[in-house]
Image (tube, rainbow, N blue to C red):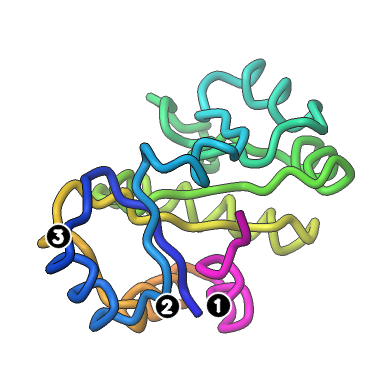
Amino acid sequence: MAIDVVLFELNDRDREITKSLGFTKVYTSNSPEFKKLKIVNGADDETNRKAVENPNKDILLNPHAVRSRDFMHSRNCGLNHVLCKIATENDVAIGFTLDRMYEPKDIARVKLAIKLCRKFKNKIVVFSFAKDIYSMRAVNDIYAFLEVIGMDSGQARNALNFVI
C-alpha cells in the first residue's frame, strides 16, 4: 500500500495511471483529507523548532528547504538532535518531498536528516508533489531511491504508507 500527494487535479485516466504505478491512493493538495493534516513548511531554525514543539502539528515538511549555506564541516539539514528528540516526544513526523530533491546538496541534506531521524526514531513521510502525471514515479522507483539515500526497506515502506 503506497499513498502519494500530487499538486494537480486527477481525472479518470490519471487515476488509472497512478494505479499502474503502484499507488493505492493519491491525494491532491486541494483534497479535504490532505487539508486535515497540520503541516508546517520548513524554514529558519526558529520556525522548525516551533513546529516540532507544538503537539498539534502533524508534519514538519522539508526542514532543509530554505538553507542557503552549509556549515564548515557538515551539511545544514534544518534538524539537529534536539529538534529530533522534541519531534519524537510530540509525535511530529518529518516530511520530505521529491520535488525538493533535485540538486546534490539537497539530497545530501536529506541524507543527513534521515540519519538523524533514524537515530531518534522519528516518523518520516515522503510525498512526490508531482506537478503533472509525467513527473510521477513508480512506487518501486521511489523505494529504491529512498534506500539509496539512507533509509532501510522498512523505513522506506513506512514513509510512503502514512495515514491521514
Q: Which residue is mark 2?
A: 143
| Amino acid type at image mark 2 | Tyr
Q: Which residue is mark 1?
A: 157
Does the stretch in magenta take in 161? yes
Q: Position of residue 42 (x, y in %)?
A: 52, 29
Q: Residue at x 29, y 78 (%)?
A: 19
Q: Secondary structure at mark 3?
A: helix
Q: Residue furthest right?
A: 89
Does the stretch in magenta take in 85? no
Q: Residues within 10 Å of mark 2 (few under 14, many from 20)?
A: some
Q: Residue at x 10, y 62 (%)?
A: 134
Q: Which residue is mark 3?
A: 133
Q: Residue at x 46, y 66 (%)?
A: 3
**For this view, does 14 lie left or right of residue 78?**
left
How far is the residue under mark 3 from the one under mark 2?
19 Å
How far is the residue under mark 2 from the one under mark 1?
7 Å
Pointer 2 and pointer 1: residues touching (CB < 8 Å)? Answer: yes
Q: Residues within 10 Å of mark 1 (few under 14, many from 20)?
A: many
**Front: mark 3 or 1:** 3
Q: Residue at x 37, y 61 (%)?
A: 26
Pointer 3 and pointer 1: residues touching (CB < 8 Å)? Answer: no
Q: Position of residue 49 (x, y in %)?
A: 72, 24
**Front: mark 3 or 2:** 3
How far is the residue under mark 3 from the one under mark 1?
22 Å
Taking depth in this image into account, of 84 and 11 the one nearest to the observer is 11
| Amino acid type at image mark 1 | Arg
| Amino acid type at image mark 3 | Ile
Stretch in magenta: 151-164
Pointer 3 and pointer 2: residues touching (CB < 8 Å)? Answer: no
Mark before the other along the chain sequence, 3 or 2: 3
**For this view, does 141 lie left or right of residue 39?**
left
